[in-house]
Image (cartoon, grey):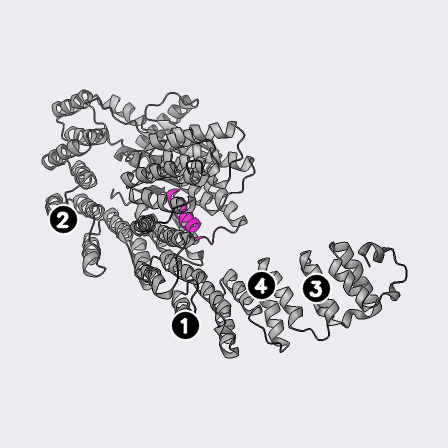
Amino acid sequence: MSVRQFQTLRAFDTLNHNSILSLITKSKSLSQTQQIHAHILKTGNSNDTYFTNNLLSLYLNCQRFTDAESVLHSLPNPNIFSFKALIHASSKSNLFSYTLVLFSRLISACILPDVHILPSAIKACAGLSAVEVGKQVHGFGLTSGLALDSFVEASLVHMYVKCNQLKCARKVFDKMLEPDLVSWSALASGYARRGDVVNAKLVFDQAGKLGIEPNLVSWNGIIAGFNQSGCYPEAVCMFLRMYSEGFRSDGASISSVLPAIGDLEDLKMGVQVHCHVIKMGLECDICIISALIDMYGKCRCTLEMSRVFEGAEETDLGAFNALVAGLSRNGLVDEAFKVFKKFKRRGTELNVVSWTSMIGSCSQHGKDLEALEIFREMQLAKVMPNSVTISSLLPACGNIAALVHGKATHCFSLRNCFPDDVYVGSALIDMYANCGRIQVARLVFDRMPVRNLVCWNAMTSGYAMHGKAKEAIEIFELMQRSGQKPDFISFTSVLSACSQAGLIEQGQYYFNSMSRVHGLQARVEHYACMVSLLGRAGKLKEAYSMMSTMPVEPDSCVWGALLSSCRLHRNTSLGEIAANKLFELEPKNPGNYILLSNIYASNNRWKEVDRVRDRMKYVGLSKNPGCSWIEIKNKVHMLLAGDDLHPQMPHIMEKLRKLSMDMKNSGVSHDMDFVLQDVEEQDKELILCGHSEKLAVVLGILNTNPGTPLSVIKNLRICGDCHLFIKFISSFEGREIYVRDTNRFHHFNEGVCSCGDYW
């Protein structure tokens, strides 16, 4: 009897047992299955386990798990076959939680699973990374004797490898009577992914003794594993060994080894692999194209990288993303932006990686406003940002103190459950600290459920930037009590905090403890902090003496710290030594010439000032103009020293003159020592009025309500007269004013600065 005949029958009761069974086996659609099910229920055959088990299989073939579940529930005495079909199908469909629920019900029904059911339950444990449940299933297998089955053993090895329990996986593998190729490959690649080179090679080299013949998948697994764990030399060595043993590499092999070659910056090897790709005829493989672009980008060969991209017959988003990342990595942000715009104009549907790469590129290379604009375009394109996008965007907000944008990004992360991500949390701490809101940064830090070293360092660095040395030291000590070991960045932050506050004894203690207690060799950045600490405290000879004890040659940061301290204390002799060394190390940095010129000017040595400036002109350098940023009503304004292009400049200058007069009337005079030109007193005052941080603060006063806090960022160090002037404004106008210069944060409130005038 056919299904069609069944559908036309009026008297369902006339169908006998064999007719129903025939219909079940021939049913091919959901509607037919449901009609058969209805007939079985009507005729009272639903208790027939044979019928219902076949009906279960029909529903599972149609992916109707709810209907299959109802059939299972209808059975008064389900047997192992009833559960087996459902457990196997749910595991195959990756419904792992449901698989384990069914397995639990099977055990509760006192039905003993067989060697076909147990692997499905083990696979579910692996899929959920539920290693404790997996161990329970393993224990059941041992007590029941099912764990001795080779298929069950292989499933256990895979489960333990996937759950990163390699000791357990190794124990199971070593007890296997007939270890198979798949289990052996999984164990070897598992060790490789963890970075356990010794055990990975040990297992891999046992293949011959175990009677296992490695295949290409095995080689690819261990090469990819070493690459993922950062064991780049081992990944390259295994690739070469594979080739020497006569295995023909494929796209997966080459795509796995090229990133390792790139990270090693082994251009010679990269070119050889590229030639091999061409010989093998794999140059059209899209994955290989992306890997080649990435490799050349890491090796700083941007021309070859672009040639690979342009010469490819077909490229995908992976290749585009690799090109953008490669250009950005090599500082070619403008070129990356052009490529990005070109693809957008083509109507290419960019993914979250594309947008995030471009945002990160702009954020890392000083194009912060562009990063904010790209994020806005990304939202208009309805591409959902992820946690990496947010972590890339927040530094841009912090770099220009765009607090409103930073808060909006924070809100977005809250709505999308990103703040629990440690990298988003670290970026939030850094953003709020850079925007002057160190208290909010601490709130974010305190509310983080999990903290890694990056979070601790961000908080310590934030306090250091704000001159809160006591709090920075407290965080540093709390980090260690929490079981987190400090690294080089941790010590740089705490030493910087000591330098900002002039804590010489504490700074020397932490510097010495690096090697004595923590086994870390001090780097040049730590010496730079110590030279700054000693130099700013007036101990210039001690600072210079310390430089001679360095295990490596002092770099520009160390000499720069000494030169800045000489500028602070007007020390010409040491200043000349530091400056001349910096002229050799950084011939294109005008800041060093300016600092030496300022030292001469502060000592009224105007001939030497002219000589330094003539030398600057001779080598083609000019002074970087002072520039400040301020965010007002969601818009970031940039003002240059002596700026006359801003549309509100007449009002700014009028207000500035009035405030200067108010300051004089209150008995506070401008500090003329910070005019480093040989001009009349009246001209000096005009020059001081043109400093960019003054212009930015006054612009903020003109465009915000009374009492509104103001945040300003300056590209150079704040001058003493501006510091004095802004202290006055904070009291006279009743404003909290945050100014971040290249050295630290200044928080002005009621005529007092957080730096205590020690800067």
User: Disc 3 or disc 4, which is closer to the eye?
Assistant: 3
Magenta residues, dominant SS class: helix
On screen, 449 above or below 466? below
Mark found first going from the N terminus, 4 or 2: 4
In the image, what residue type sits under mark 1? Lys
Label 1 or label 4, whichever comes before in sequence order: 4
Q: Classify 561 as above or below 162.
A: above
- The segment highlighted magenta reads 418-437
- Foreground residue, 265 or 426? 265
Circle 2 SS class: loop
Q: Which residue is mark 4?
A: 97
Determine whether, in the image, residue 222 is placed left or right of residue 123: left
Q: Which residue is mark 1?
A: 175
Residue bearing the label numbered 3:
56
Which residue type carries mark 4? Answer: Ser
Residue tagged 2: 551
